[in-house]
């Protein structure tokens, strides 16, 4: 009896109860992930702050702006984010305007019956949430891991002929992407009308990166015949 009373006393301790509530578990972790604003969420909050749209129109506009070149957002993610943001009152449904041309996309019936038939706009709470998310330090500290750099680190295991062929393939790809981005920049200038706009800056950065890589690839192609192993290789020593 004394043991049960002692256990009951410990369980009723306020500090212990609070610790249990705060202890991260699978459900609590999943809840935090669901509350966090993802890249698709932020892209939609920004887009619908410009102009109210329904899901199909938002998808069309994202495609027109070629947003998927710089943000990982798929068509299904657009509908998921619309529902999520509306539940959290970061978006609100407004009176629909002119219907968008074309049929709604072939998504699940639940999604099609919702976001495609309602016009959404960003609420004041949504604007504050977006502004807060844009203060994160992580935006400025990320580092990409392009597949080509991984390939380059492993390329010593390929034949010299294959290495040169892959470098030339990359050079052709980067050249084509550079031409495409330059065309995109011209269309942005036509729409924006001045060079002091975030879309101009974003595409200009992409162009500068492609131009730099293209110059580097041409230099690499000239240097490949001189490739040699390390003169002073060092390896980690296993210790127990």
Image (tube, helix red, strand yellow):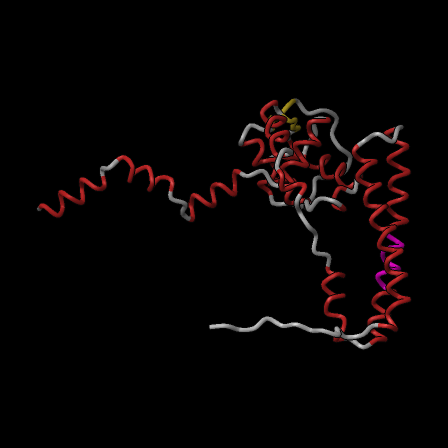
At horizontal 87% and vertical 39% (from top left) the residue drawn is 185
Count of numbered circles in the view: 0
- Location of residue 152 with respect to 86 vertically, above or below: below
- Residue 125 screen position, x and y as percent: 58, 25
The picture places residue 195, in percent across and down from the top left corner, at 87, 31
Q: Which residues are magenta?
A: 169-177
Residue 134 lies in quadrant: top right
Residue positioned most to the bottom: 159
Relative vertical location of residue 177 with respect to residue 28 in this rendering, above or below: below
Residue 237: say if magenta: no
Residue at the farthest front position: 232
Position in image of residue 232 (x %, y %):
71, 73
User: Which residue is more in the foreground, 223 or 205?
Assistant: 223
Q: Nearer the viewer, residue 43 or 205?
A: 205
In the figure, 207 relative to 233: above or below? above
Q: Quadrant of residue 128?
A: top right
Per the image, is 175 magenta? yes
Residue sitting at 58 percent across and 28 percent down?
Answer: 90
Q: Residue 129: x, y in percent?
A: 59, 30
| In-image side of 216 versus 141 (left or right) | right
Q: Nearer the viewer, residue 70 or 55?
A: 70
With respect to residue 225, does 202 lie above or below? above
Secondary structure that dominates the magenta span: helix
Q: Please state if 84 lies on the left or on the right of 13 as rendered.
A: right
């Amino acid at each position: 009896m004394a043991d049960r009373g002692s256990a009951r006393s410990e369980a009723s301790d306020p500090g212990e109860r609070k610790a249990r509530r705060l202890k991260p578990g699978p459900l609590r972790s999943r809840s935090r992930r669901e509350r966090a604003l993802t890249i698709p969420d932020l892209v939609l909050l920004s887009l619908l702050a410009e102009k109210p749209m329904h899901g199909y129109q938002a998808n069309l506009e994202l495609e027109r702006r070629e947003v998927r070149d710089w943000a990982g957002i798929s068509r299904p993610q657009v509908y998921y984010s619309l529902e999520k943001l509306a539940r959290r009152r970061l978006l609100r449904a407004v009176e629909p305007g002119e219907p968008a041309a074309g049929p709604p996309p072939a998504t699940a019936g639940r999604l099609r019956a919702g976001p495609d038939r309602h016009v959404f706009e960003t609420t004041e709470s949504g604007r504050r949430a977006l502004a807060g998310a844009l203060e994160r330090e992580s935006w400025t500290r990320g580092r990409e891991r392009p597949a080509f750099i991984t390939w380059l680190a492993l390329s010593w295991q390929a034949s010299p002929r294959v290495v040169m062929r892959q470098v030339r393939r990359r050079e052709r790809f980067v050249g084509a992407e550079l031409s495409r981005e330059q065309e995109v920049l011209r269309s942005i200038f036509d729409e924006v009308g001045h060079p002091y706009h975030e879309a101009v800056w974003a595409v200009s950065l992409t162009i500068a990166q492609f131009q730099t890589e293209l110059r580097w690839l041409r230099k690499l192609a000239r240097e490949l015949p001189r490739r040699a192993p390390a003169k002073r290789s060092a390896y980690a020593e296993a210790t127990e």
